[in-house]
Image (cartoon, rainbow, N blue to C red):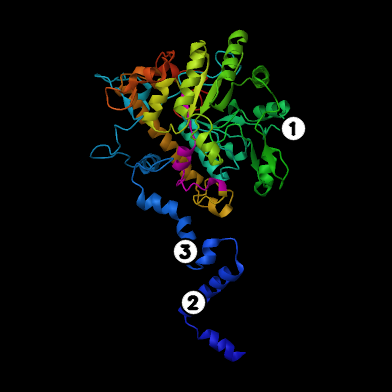
């Protein structure tokens, strides 16, 4: 026995390497039948699988050029990171973007830019940029709400994102004076750090769910009364990643905390069906919206990805005849977002934001309804030039998801659906979350929002306007081929945006319904 141990102890390190490789080879050739490559090439096959597994990272950092990656290229990510850290986000020696590329955006600047007077709110705060419309004003809701920021955090739930990520986002929107959409996972303690909140729910009714998995009005009323920072309610009809498809929350992910927040049993799979139980058609949906608004006093809106328009036209007709309906509509782009989805859905189901929004806005405008609604855009709009285009098309606010995630540390690893997010943002793994410092990350989210608003204001002033709500379809051109074939937005999408009533930035600052902007002296 001692001689055998002596023999083992005398084996060199490279000898152990050879023995290990031999064991792997024997296993693959004689015992492993699942993988043909590793069976036929027992050592090289494993090397091939290793290289394949790190291929995306290798391409991201060493192969792809600055403008090549999707969904966000290196230039876009770098701008967000630098903006969030208050670093130099400029670029020198001219743009490296192909400005002749299809769908490139051109913003028509004015000969004489807008020059704010000395007492203008933007003289004191270069990032002050509230929404030009008030949610719930037309329907005379008891608690109208004017978002204090035109850029806000989109629907991302606790469960999908980590506790520390949600906490960072909520603390960040408080600093930036924005709002935080809860996502459909319910209102958690991590959403309760002082930021304005829009409570969002879908077909699972998490947080306002009865014992049968349906909607509970009593729980909704109690939730709103107990949490006065909830400023509006959003009903999710569909999302850009997978419209018309339900989801499963695996039982392994349902901790005691998530169970209490969502109102579901610990350790059991929970199905979110594709359809709502609370309503089955458009008239019932309108009644449902009105009941919630009446019971809570809050503005109520809907979120959806856009495809067929027949039912949207039915909604518009009901709004005309009854004077009832949603206070705001959030249009999600078919580009997908943080929600995990099958490629067949993410790649092909529902329209990209620019097409879906233009179709929907045009429908409501032609029916004379665009003035009574607040339109929120959601779909890779977290960049000032894209936001200017969105405002020119009729958007009143934008929501950002992945851009907000990147501002608090997301590196676009694209493993959100695996619970192995290396930055700790989209995982429930306690160790991976431990790298997030909410105090630091909240400041970065806030700084990204402030930088975004500052640059959007500067673009707006360069175009001769005071607020981006004043952009018209003629102010933005979209490249089709050469400039002789480039079209202004109104020609591309065949409508003119409805003029938004705007009496000046000071009027917005003095609004009684303004959200919790840190510079505001008003209390809601």
Q: Residue 340: x and y, percent?
A: 56, 41
Cα–Cα gap, marks 1 and 2: 61 Å
Label 1 belongs to which residue? 210
Compare marks 1 and 2 and give the one earlier in the sequence: 2
Q: CA distance from mark 3 to mark 1?
A: 52 Å
**Image coordinates for residue 344, horizontal then vertical, percent:** 54, 39
Binning the other alpha carbons within 10 Å of mark 1 as few (below 14), some (14 to 19) or many (20 upward) gives some
Q: Which residues are magenta?
A: 396-417
Residue with the mark numbered 2:
18
Kindly identify the residue that appears in the image at 34 percent across and 30 percent down. Answer: 104
Is residue 506 a member of the stretch shown in magenta? no
| Residue bearing the label numbered 3 | 47
Q: Is residue 24 left or right of residue 496?
A: right
| Front residue (pair 24, 376) | 24
Please name the residue shown 47% across and 16% down the image. 362
Label 2 Cα neighbours within 10 Å, binned few <14 / some 14-19 / many ≥20: few
Q: Is residue 294 above or below residue 97?
A: above
Q: Quadrant of residue 485?
A: top left
Along the line of sight, the residue nearer the viewer: 390 or 100: 100
Q: Is residue 144 visible?
A: no
């Amino acid at each position: 026995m001692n001689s055998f141990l002596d023999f083992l102890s005398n084996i060199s390190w490279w000898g152990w390497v050879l023995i290990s490789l031999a064991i792997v080879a024997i296993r693959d050739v004689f015992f492993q039948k699942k993988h043909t490559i590793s069976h036929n090439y027992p050592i090289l096959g494993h090397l091939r699988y290793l290289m394949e597994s790190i291929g995306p990272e290798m391409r991201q950092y060493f192969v792809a050029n600055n403008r090549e990656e999707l969904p966000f290229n290196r230039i876009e990510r770098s701008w967000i990171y630098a903006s969030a850290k208050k670093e130099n986000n400029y670029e020198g020696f001219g743009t490296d973007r192909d400005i002749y590329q299809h769908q490139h955006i051109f913003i028509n600047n004015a000969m004489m830019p807008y020059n704010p007077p000395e007492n203008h709110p933007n003289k004191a705060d270069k990032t002050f940029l509230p929404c030009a419309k008030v949610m719930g004003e037309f329907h005379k809701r008891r608690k109208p709400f004017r978002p204090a920021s035109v850029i806000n955090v989109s629907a991302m739930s606790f469960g999908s994102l980590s506790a520390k990520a949600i906490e960072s986002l909520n603390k960040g929107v408080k600093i930036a004076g924005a709002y935080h959409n809860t996502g459909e996972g319910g209102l958690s303690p991590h959403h309760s750090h002082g930021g304005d909140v829009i409570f969002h729910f879908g077909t699972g009714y998490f947080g306002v769910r009865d014992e049968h998995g349906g909607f509970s009005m009593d729980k909704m009323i109690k939730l709103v009364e107990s949490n006065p920072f909830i400023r509006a309610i959003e009903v999710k009809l569909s999302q850009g990643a997978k419209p018309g498809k339900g989801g499963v929350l695996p039982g392994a992910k349902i901790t005691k905390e998530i169970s209490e927040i969502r109102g579901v049993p610990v350790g059991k799979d929970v199905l979110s069906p594709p359809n709502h139980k609370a309503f089955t058609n458009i008239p019932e949906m309108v009644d449902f919206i009105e009941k919630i608004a009446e019971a809570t006093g809050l503005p109520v809106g809907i979120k959806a990805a856009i495809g067929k328009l027949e039912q949207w036209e039915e909604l518009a007709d009901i709004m005309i005849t009854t004077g009832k309906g949603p206070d705001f509509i959030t249009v999600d782009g078919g580009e997908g977002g943080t929600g995990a989805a099958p490629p067949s859905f993410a790649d092909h189901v529902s329209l990209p934001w620019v097409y879906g929004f233009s179709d929907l806005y045009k429908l409501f405008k032609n029916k004379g309804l665009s003035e009574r609604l607040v339109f929120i855009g959601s779909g890779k709009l977290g960049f000032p030039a894209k936001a200017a285009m969105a405002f020119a098309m009729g958007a009143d606010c934008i929501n950002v998801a992945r851009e907000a995630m990147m501002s608090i540390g997301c590196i676009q690893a694209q493993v959100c659906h695996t619970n192995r997010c290396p930055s700790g943002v989209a995982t429930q793994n306690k160790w991976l979350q431990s790298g997030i410092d909410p105090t630091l990350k909240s400041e970065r989210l806030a700084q990204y929002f402030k930088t975004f608003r500052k640059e959007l204001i500067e673009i707006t002033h360069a175009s001769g306007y005071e607020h981006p709500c004043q952009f018209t379809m003629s102010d933005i051109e979209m490249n089709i081929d050469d400039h002789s074939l480039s079209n202004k937005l109104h020609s591309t999408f065949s409508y003119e945006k409805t003029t938004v009533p705007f009496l000046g930035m000071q009027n917005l600052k003095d609004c009684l319904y303004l959200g919790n902007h840190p510079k505001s002296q008003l209390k809601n």
